[in-house]
Image: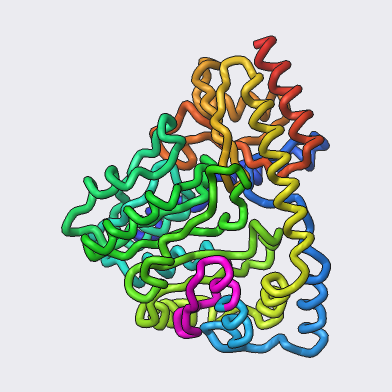
Amino acid sequence: MKSISKAANKLSGQPMFHILEKVNELKRQGKKILEFELGDPDFNTPKNIVQKAYDSLIRGETHYTNSKGLVEFRQAVVEATEKSRKFTPSLEQILVCPGANASIFYTIGCTVNPGEEVIIPDPCFPTYVSSINFLGAKPVRIPLKEKNEFRLNPSDVEKEITGKTRLIIMNSPHNPTGSVMNEEEMKEMYDIAKEKDVYLLSDEIYARMVYDDEETKFCSPSKYDECKERIIVANGFSKSYAMTGWRLGVVIGPEKLIKKMALLLETNVSCVSPFIQKAGIEALKGNQKPIDEMMKEFRERRDLIYEGLNKLPGVHCLKPKGAFYAFPNIKGTEMNDTEFADYMLERASIACCPGSFFGDNFKDYVRFCYASSKKDINEAVERMYKVLKNR
């Protein structure tokens, strides 16, 4: 049998889906598993958004469209950006992608050459590492420290920049820790990127998921150059609008770069389905009450799981500031991350993710996604307390 490519052997994918596969097998066996492994909201997509996609399908809008995205959808993104980030991108700065995940791959593919370096937070969303390795570049990890609330420290980034650095990736609110960077840190990140003449990709998929603690507000480095020179913003509809299965994302960046990224998308998937983009327009411009209610519910779930995890023997957890993840330290249980995750799945029928899925140096942590109901969170805490107490 012929061997596969060296690039293919470097792919690592998203290991969270491996747990999902195991969970689905257990559920087929009749077991009730409480799921906290995957960043998939348990809400259905709001009905007004679904209706717009249905209407589009009925009208026969099922053909190819502009590979950059429908003009009316990109215009809706322009208007949303004016409100949320206080600048007005041109239509040529906007690319509609099949999910924000794809925009990360397209950005790396169009900014970094094989052998060059990409700076990433550690821990991080696994797609960063898989994409960088596949494309023949080198990931340079910047450790996030619990004592700094897992926020990316700009001075740590600056120390790791070399002549081979082409791109910095940052993510706030952050997966897997739920940390949120402040405006001063954002400005420092922009200044570093400008001084060192590198691109800065800001993964803002959780932008709407910043809880209204007085000291925590969403901010973006895009305000400093309006995505005209080096800042690239990746965003999507999966999390905030409960549209994970729709695969709809948007990237904003310098026109010259977006033009090349559009060619890569065109080569890869041709275009994003027009009826899905029509749903995206409704998500941005339609009734926001269901979205606001979801955000209120996520905050309540955040408070619940934070309090619950800190009651468990041998576990302590920082309060997440955004996204929908908790990243507790489980060192006091005398189990490492995989032992803890396996133990909870086997003994308590609870699925969570080992911290090492997101970074090799995080074997003392696990990730819980609190996209599950408050009832499930309460039951999970009770089950975990029981099995840890009796261990």
Q: Is residue 186 left or right of residue 374?
A: left
The residue at 54%/73% (across/down) is 82
The quarter of the picture where residue 22 lies is top right
* Front residue of this view, candidates 196 and 115: 196
Give 36 or 316, whichever is nearer the viewer.
Answer: 316
Q: How many marks?
A: 0
Q: Please, which colouring scheme is shown?
A: rainbow
Looking at the rendered image, the quarter that the N terminus falls into is: bottom left
**Picture residue at 70% right of the left edge, 74% below the top:** 285
- Image position of 381 with respect to 284: above or below: above
Q: Is residue 86 magenta?
A: yes
Residue 129 appears in view: no
- Magenta-highlighted residues: 79-99
Q: To which quarter of the image does residue 77 belong?
A: bottom right
Is the residue 389 above or below the residue 252 in the image? above
- Quadrant holding the C terminus: top right
Q: Residue at x 67, y 71 (%)?
A: 284
Q: Is residue 6 above or below residue 232?
A: above
Does the segment drawn in magenta span residue 204? no
Q: Nearer the viewer, residue 68 or 152?
A: 152
Residue 166 image point, x, y percent = 27, 62
Where in the figure is residue 88, as x and y percent of width and height?
A: 49, 78
Q: Residue furthest front?
A: 214
Relative image position of residue 268 (x, y in whole percent): 49, 76
